[in-house]
Amino acid sequence: MKTLRTMSTHRHHVLELPTPLMWEGHVDNFIVFLRSQGLVATSIRTKRNHVLQLARAFPDIPPTELDPGSLVEWCGTRAWANETRHAYYSTFRRFFGWLDSRHHCGNISSVLPRIRRPSGTPRPIPDSILVDCVDHATLRDALILRLAAEAGLRCVEIAQVEVGDVYEGADGWDLFVRGKGGRTRTVPITADLAQAIITRCAATGQYAFPGRFGGHMAANSVSQIGRRVLPDTWTLHKLRHRYATKAYSAEHDLLIVRELLGHASLQTTVRYIAPSPRARDAVLDATRVQSPASPNNPILPAQPA
């Protein structure tokens, strides 16, 4: 079995999980395959850890000989939320599909059911709660909240913010963001938020949120900070809902909001936008049938003779 070691990338260092000997060559080759597909380092590490958790459950059985029943039984013992289960199943389908293409061992992941990820209702955090949390948070945690709320960043994007990402353009301050799937984007930010990032990076070094073993903080650590600082069931992801809702209210342009959030499709963006409480009244006012003689009064049914 491999011992714990540090995997170095051009971005930062990551502590790897040990690989059971029976799985070692297969996992290493799978990583090479994922890199050839253009996956970013964060996605590769996530998928590798998914596979390694399965490998450590069956260290004496090579993945080419693992049977479908064992895979299903192990997955059934995991207390995953639907979103997490969807992610694991996606990795297993990719891993065992790749394994079958190389060794013709059969794709045992075909027995895994399709998991529907709940779209849910957009739930932007109220400003009163957000302001109170920012006011009572440490400087680090307050900046994490602001990057999610004021710039719409994901946890993994917040983790990677560094000193060179903030710059002043002709129209004001901008933040360079490294998004999902290797996509990048630029989002406008206030001068106040820009200064907060610059000040933080000056104090910490390259990254605004350095990791414990060098490089930047892990996305999961950023998420945990959000859960600790925010009350009840509010999360940093709900701050993206807030950002999307307010951005749409300002311009009523889905294309702009999609670009700011880094979404690939408009359908995803729509799920982030909560209807404005004022929208209902505006619709009622706009659609009400009014009397031409008295615009302020609706037309009433004619009285029976």
Image (tube, grey):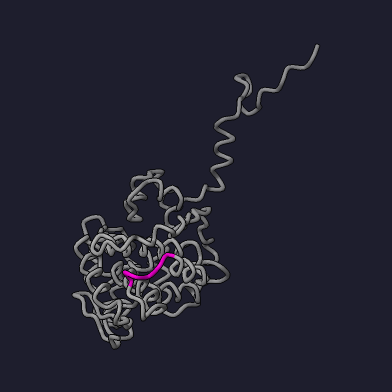
* Residue numbers of the magenta segment: 63-68
Would you say 277 lies left or right of 48 here? right
Q: Is residue 20 visible?
A: yes
Question: Which quarter shows the N terminus?
Answer: bottom left
Comparing 157 with 30, the one in front is: 30
Comparing 203 with 84, the one in front is: 84
**Where 126 falls versus 24 (above or below)?**
above
Question: Which quarter shows the C terminus?
Answer: top right
- In the image, residue 223 lies in the stretch drawn in magenta: no
**Where 24 falls versus 301 (above or below)?**
below
Total labels drawn: 0
**Where 1 falls versus 188 (above or below)?**
below
Comparing 24 with 191, the one in front is: 24
**Prevailing SS of the magenta stretch:** helix
Identify the image quadrant of residue 158: bottom left
Would you say 164 lies left or right of 210 here? left
User: For the point 45% across and 70% down, which residue is it?
Assistant: 70
For this orientation, the residue located farthest to the bottom is: 3
Q: Is residue 173 visible?
A: no
- In the image, residue 66 lies in the stretch drawn in magenta: yes
User: For the point 50% across and 76% down, which residue is it?
Assistant: 228
User: For the point 33% across and 85% down, which residue is it?
Assistant: 212
For this orientation, the residue located farthest to the top is: 305
Q: Residue 164: x, y in percent?
A: 21, 70
User: For the point 52% across and 47% down, which residue is it?
Assistant: 275
Q: Residue 78: x, y in percent?
A: 50, 71
Q: Residue 192: x, y in percent?
A: 35, 68
**Where 163 falls versus 100 (above or below)?**
below
